[in-house]
Amino acid sequence: MPRSRKHTTWLVTFGGIAVIGVLIAFMVFLQVEASRNNDFKRAFEKIVIDTNALTQQYTAEEDKWLSRDNNTMIQVIDQYLPRYDDLIERAKALNTPEKYKSAHDYLVSAIELERQSYQHFRNYLATADQSEYEKSSETISGSLEQSVNADAAIKEAG
């Protein structure tokens, strides 16, 4: 074979191997990205489930409040606030792919607003300041709205 033909064959072979390498790297990238997305969605769902469970537990305690004094309910709230702090930290620590950023932000906001609502309710119980009760109602409504937004955003992102 003449030298230029060997060189062309070598270039075609090397080029083909390079293209195959790029394709393999791209496929690996897609698999890693899909795995990252799935990991995020599982962790996101786990936080949502844990938040819902904690909310149900808290609501059950609040339902008993009518037969309790305010100081007892304040103590209950004091036990729950750090648990919401933990959920907020878990949510903030998620390794969030860009396409899920808005869902993530809504989730964090929903949990933070729920926590704020209970803090305002605690303040109301301690001071009888009606504005604290109103803030509690406003922030729990905001939390519910952010939860709906988080759900819609996670579904939209796929």
Image (spheres, rainbow, N blue to C red):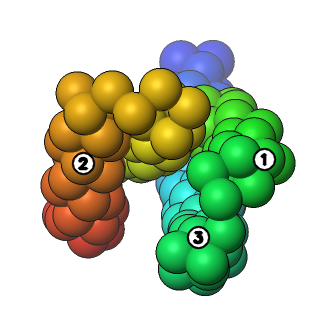
Task: Identify whether 143 is placed above or below 88.
Answer: below
Could you give the CA–CA distance between mark 1 and mark 2, rounded to whole angstroms?
Answer: 20 Å
Nearest to viewer (mark 2 / mark 3): 3
Quadrant housing the C terminus: bottom left
Amino acid under disc 3: Trp
Could you give the CA–CA distance between mark 2 and mark 3, rounded to whole angstroms?
Answer: 17 Å
Q: Which circle's residue, 1 or 3, is located before the other in the chain?
A: 3
Q: Which circle's residue, 1 or 2, is located before the other in the chain?
A: 1
Residue 143 seen from this side:
yes
Label 3 crowd bin: few (<14), some (14–19), many (20+), radius 10 Å: some
Are dots 1 and 3 in contact, CB under 8 Å?
A: no
Amino acid under disc 1: Gln
Give residue 65's mark.
Answer: 3
Of residues 93 and 85, the one nearer the viewer is: 85
Residue at disc 1, secondary structure: helix
Locate residue 146, reporting x and y percent.
25, 50
Give residue 75's mark.
Answer: 1
Residue at disc 2, secondary structure: helix
Of residues 82 and 109, the one nearer the viewer is: 82
Quadrant housing the N terminus: top right
* Image side of residue 75 versus residue 14, left or right: right
Locate residue 137, reporting x and y percent.
24, 48
Give residue 86's mark.
Answer: none
Amino acid under disc 2: Ser
Residue 16 seen from this side:
no
Give the residue drawn at x 30%, y 51%.
Answer: 140
Locate residue 77, reporting x and y percent.
68, 48
Of residues 5 and 24, the one nearer the viewer is: 24
- Residue wearing tag 2: 137
